[in-house]
Amino acid sequence: MKKSIMTIALVACLGLLGSGIAAARPGLGVGGPGYGIGGQQGVAQLDDATLQQREQFLNETLDLRRQINSKRTELQAVLRAANPDEARATSLSNELFDLQEQMRQKAQTAGISGRCGMGGGACGGGACVNQ
């Protein structure tokens, strides 16, 4: 009986400790790290010129971001197949790398920096602009 009570008390304490840690870590709510209910944190703090520069960059790279997303999806499908085609996976991986490098160069030219969207590798949906 004592053993059961101690086990229940220990589980309850661990649960309270875990919820306390989660509550103490801001920015880990809806949408994952750095995102709040209203979207990406920090975007609303940018001035109008910076927001316009960011929007221009996103509009100019829309096609490139679509290609990156398409290649990433195709690569995942190849890798998840019952018998993955190693040559096709390598080819897609190389194409994806080249597209991401193009995006990085365009971002650098446009003055975009910070945490980038598209999985954190290629600047995209979550791109920020240098201030």
Image (spheres, rainbow, N blue to C red):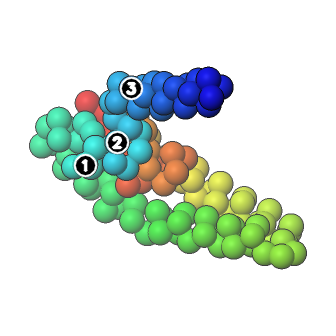
Image height check: is 87 above or below 50? below
Q: Which image quadrant: the N terminus?
A: top right
- Provide residue 46's location: percent of width, then percent of height: 18, 37
Amino acid type for the residue under numbered disc 2: Gly
Image height check: is 7 above or below 103? above
Q: Which residue is mark 2?
A: 29
Q: Which residue is mark 1?
A: 37
| Number of marks in picture | 3
Q: Earlier in the sequence, mark 1 or mark 3?
A: 3
Q: Which residue is mark 3?
A: 20
Quote the CA–CA distance across marks 1 and 2.
8 Å
Q: Which image quadrant: the C terminus?
A: top left
Say which of 117 and 14 sits in front: 14
Amino acid type for the residue under numbered disc 1: Ile
The reply to whether callout 2 and callout 3 are in contact (CB within 8 Å) is: no
Badge number at residue 45 = none
Quote the CA–CA distance across marks 2 and 3.
14 Å
- Provide residue 114's location: percent of width, then percent of height: 40, 35
Q: Label 1 neighbourhood size at 10 Å, few (<14), some (14-19), many (20+)?
A: few
Res 11 → quadrant: top right
The reply to whether callout 1 and callout 2 are in contact (CB within 8 Å) is: yes
Amino acid type for the residue under numbered disc 3: Gly
Q: Which residue, as the protein is rendered here, is positioned at the far front?
A: 1
Q: Is residue 111 visible?
A: no
Per the image, label 1 sits on a secondary structure element best described as: loop
Question: Residue drawn at (34%, 48%), measured in percent from left and top?
Answer: 30
Q: Earlier in the sequence, mark 1 or mark 2?
A: 2
Single out the mark in the foreground, 1 or 3: 3
Question: Residue drawn at (47%, 69%), measured in percent from left and top?
Answer: 66
Question: Residue drawn at (65%, 73%), measured in percent from left and top?
Answer: 74
Quote the CA–CA distance across marks 1 and 3.
20 Å
Left or right position of 92 against 69: right
